Image: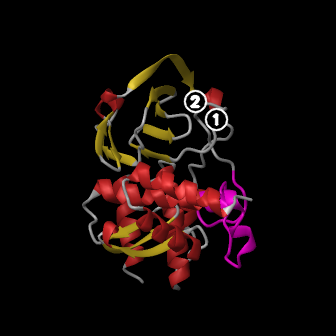
Amino acid sequence: MTEPADTNAHLAKFSRQYGFTEDAVRHLFEAVTQGGGDMAMFDHPEFHGPGQWMRGGLMMTTTPGDRVLNNAIESLCNRLSALLRAQHALEQSGYRRISPEARAWDTSVSPRQRWWPHEWSDPVANGQTDDLAYAFFDDAARLAIRSGDQVDLYKTADHCITGIAQAQQGTSATLVFTTPFGELPLDELARCEGHKSNTTDNATATENRSGESAVAGQAAPQSSMEILQAIEKLGALHREGVLTDDEFNAKKQALLNRL
């Protein structure tokens, strides 16, 4: 189990990586802890006031148009959640736990496609836009880009990638990522020469493309918890590419209107 000194070291590291003060990072760490590692309600000046995060798809702040800030907060929350799991602190709490390998709020372990190199663990940030997918690995300082069946790797140096800022369909050359300190075009990163792989060589499971119909077939959520669970499931489908950005946002807003 991770000792408090190690926790402080991680929080200090995150402070440097994300450009937030240690006070802000600790505030978010406490909020994620209170949320059982799966959600957080926070209120800090560096985050422009109050906001809410839920692992897998929900991110709400007072500045929804600030993609750089919102991606940074979401990425940091994911890192803090992973830190808590590594500490096994959540297993000792009374919170309902969600397996890191589970999809949405299903507490059972589901197969997960790992299209990146086998030797790497879970990415710090990952997502998909159109037919392109990305995964950022902080420890390895590498960014993996999947286009169709092709995977290319890039060196990220000291950059901490938190999400996608913009992209044009069908070409990775137009990708622009967000970092805590601004936007980063993909063409500014050095490609790892000599490495090309096929996603079928790296995948350990196939994506579930029937998820949307499964969600649609469920009874309409009524309680606040059911609504939040439904949003979490939509987030998982969005990350897997089952739902487009427009579909995800429309369905999420419809659920939020019920709260």
Which residue lies most toward the top here? 194
Q: Residues within 10 Å of mark 1 (few under 14, many from 20)?
A: some
Viewer-closest of 250 and 107? 107
Q: Is residue 236 above or below residue 208?
A: below
Q: Residues within 10 Å of mark 2 (few under 14, many from 20)?
A: some
Residue lying at 61% horizontally and 67% vertically, measured from the top left? 105
- Give the quadrant of the N terminus: bottom right
Residue 222 in sight: no
Q: Position of residue 210 (x, y in %)?
A: 58, 53
Please indicate whether residue 81 sits to the left or right of residue 60 in the image.
Answer: right
Viewer-closest of 80 and 127? 80
Q: Position of residue 121 (x, y in %)?
A: 64, 41
Q: Is residue 54 above or below residue 203?
A: below
The residue labelled by disc 2 is 199
* Chief secondary structure of the magenta portion: loop
Question: Magenta span covers which residues?
Answer: 83-110
The residue labelled by disc 1 is 203
Contact (CB < 8 A) between labels 1 and 2?
A: yes
Residue 146 in sight: yes
Please indicate whether residue 13 sits to the left or right of residue 37 in the image.
Answer: left
- Look at the image and say whether residue 109 sits in the magenta stretch: yes
Label 1, secondary structure: give it: loop
- Give the quadrant of the C terminus: bottom left
Viewer-closest of 51 and 170? 51
- Look at the image and say whether residue 222 sits in the magenta stretch: no
Quadrant of the image occupied by residue 83: bottom right
Residue lying at 42% horizontally and 51% vertically, measured from the top left? 16
Quadrant of the image occupied by residue 191: top left
Amino acid type assigned to the residue bearing label 2 in the image: Thr
